[in-house]
Amino acid sequence: MTQPDRAAIAALAQKCLDAKGVGCEAWEKEIDDRVAALYGL
């Protein structure tokens, strides 16, 4: 995982934490998509 990938995923995760899990579906999907792409899933 490159530093830009790590930073992007961390930023999305922080948005979800800041929102206390409310309305995070789009961010969670983006996290899932990015992780899947990194692992070739």
Image: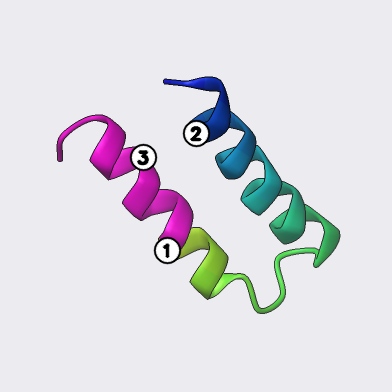
Task: State the predominant SS element of the stretch in magenta.
Answer: helix
**Which mark is drawn over residue 29?**
1
8 inside magenta stretch: no
Label 2 to label 3: alpha-carbon separation: 9 Å
Specify which label sits upstream in the sequence, 2 or 1. 2
Q: Residue 30, percent across and down?
A: 44, 59
**Front tag of 2 and 1:** 2
Q: Secondary structure at mark 3?
A: helix
Q: Name the outermost residue toward the left.
A: 41
Which stretch appears magenta?
Answer: 30-41
Q: Secondary structure at mark 1?
A: helix
Identify the residue under disc 2.
5
Residue 8, quarter of picture:
top right
Q: Residue 31, percent across and down?
A: 47, 51
Q: Residue at the location (62% across, 70% down)? A: 24
Q: Residue at the location (42% across, 63% down)? A: 29
Specify which label sits upstream in the sequence, 3 or 1. 1
22 w.r.t. 11: above or below: below
39 inside magenta stretch: yes
Q: Name the outermost residue toward the bottom.
A: 23
Instruction: Give, as a three-letter code, the residue at label 2.
Output: Asp
Task: Give left or right: position of 24 versus 22.
Answer: left
Label 3 to label 1: alpha-carbon separation: 10 Å
Identify the residue under disc 3.
35
